[in-house]
Image: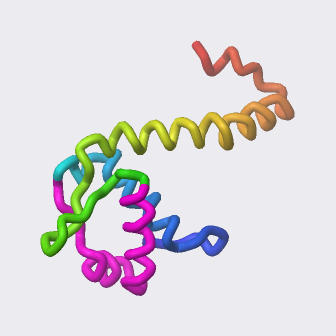
């Protein structure tokens, strides 16, 4: 995993896990790598991974079964999609509209 220096690593890890859940790599109800496993796999401190898992647990994307590990929540896909849709509409779409306007692109072209 390559990291962007403009965004905190723990956020990037959380985003990457969400992408992997959306892509089907990690399935609802399935186990995800432990904090230590994931840290070793991507080359970061386990505390950084733990912070990412904490965020995803708070968002109800994953859950911890004490002594067993972390698992993808049953409704994780819906939670992630809702969050990403809101972020797209609130943050990315206005930038897209502005850029399209500056370039003289008619947005109706994209609807068809």
Residue plotted at (17% across, 50% down):
29
Rendering quarter of residue 71 = bottom left
Residue 65 sits above or below residue 99 on the image: below
Residue plotted at (31% across, 84% down):
40
Q: Tell me if residue 69 is in the magenta stretch.
A: no
Colour scheme of the rendered structure: rainbow
Q: Where is residue 9 in the image (x, y as percent from the top left)?
A: 52, 73
Instruction: Looking at the picture, tell me which residue is in the foreground, 35 or 26.
Output: 35
Residue 44 sits above or below residue 104 on the image: below
* Image quarter in which the N terminus is found: bottom left
Left or right for 84, reference 69: right
Q: Where is residue 23 in the image (x, y as percent from the top left)?
A: 32, 47
Residue 89 sits above or below residue 72 on the image: above
Q: Tell me if residue 35 is in the magenta stretch.
A: yes
Instruction: Looking at the picture, tell me which residue is in the foreground, 4 or 82.
Output: 82
Residue plotted at (52% across, 36% down):
85
Q: What stretch is highlighted in magenta?
A: 30-58
Rendering quarter of residue 77 = top left
Q: Which residue lies furthest to the left in this view?
A: 68
* Image quarter in which the C terminus is found: top right
Residue plotted at (44% across, 67% down):
13
Left or right for 109, reference 71: right
């Amino acid at each position: 995993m390559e990291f962007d220096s403009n965004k905190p690593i723990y956020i990037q890890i959380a985003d990457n896990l969400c992408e992997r859940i959306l892509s089907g790599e990690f399935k609802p109800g399935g186990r995800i790598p432990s904090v230590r496993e994931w840290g070793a796999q991507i080359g970061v401190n386990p505390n950084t991974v733990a912070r990412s898992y904490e965020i995803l647990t708070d968002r109800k994307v994953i859950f911890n079964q004490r002594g067993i590990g972390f698992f993808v929540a049953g409704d994780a896909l819906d939670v992630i999609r809702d969050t990403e849709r809101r972020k797209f509409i609130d943050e990315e779409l206005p930038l897209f509209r502005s850029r399209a306007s500056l370039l003289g692109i008619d947005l109706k072209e994209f609807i068809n």
